[in-house]
Image (cartoon, rainbow, N blue to C red):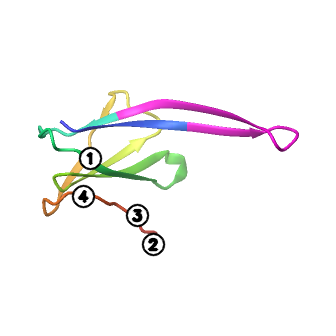
Amino acid sequence: KLSMEFYLLDHQTTEMSDHCTASINSNVSFLCSYRTLAKSTIDHRMNIVRAIPLLPADSRCHLCLAGDSDGLLHIVVISELGNSRGTTIGNLFSDSGRPVLCIEFLPL
């Protein structure tokens, strides 16, 4: 089975009084994992993953798209609040069967 792990990087920078030195505080926390339901071959892999925040910003959710070597597009919504189950479910869209190598979001 294919799987992806999602983490939240909380990165804060604080300037010191001399404006030259900064204090950096980073924290990484696990949000959830995503797994496909179907069995995959040893050569089946994720090729590309892209994510954008969903509106409104206070929802703290992200739309994640991933393309795999079998031509499937995986669509998952991830919340920064975490998932008590530890795993999340996404939707799959089939294409021509050719590997998905690039995903770009276009502003409208």
View extreme (front): residue? 43
What residue is rendered at 26% in x and 45% in y? Answer: 90
What residue is disc 1 on? 46
Of the two numbered discs 3 and 1 on the same chain, state the one appearing first in sequence.
1
Which stretch did the figure color magenta? 10-32
Please tell me whether mark 3 or mark 4 is closer to you in this view. Answer: 4
Examine the structure image and report whether residue 21 is included in the region drawn in magenta: yes
Percent coordinates x, y for residue 6 in the rendering:
39, 37
Of the two numbered discs 2 and 4 on the same chain, state the one appearing first in sequence.
4
What residue is rendered at 22% in x and 44% in y? Answer: 45
Q: Amino acid at mark 2?
A: Leu
Quarter of the image that includes the C terminus: bottom left
Q: Which mark is residue 100?
A: 4
What residue is disc 2 on? 108
> At numbered mark 4, what does the secondary structure look like: helix, strand or loop?
loop
Label 3 vs label 2: CA separation?
9 Å
User: Please, what is the dominant secondary structure of the magenta stretch?
Assistant: strand
Q: Which mark is residue 105?
A: 3
Percent coordinates x, y for residue 59 in the rendering:
49, 47
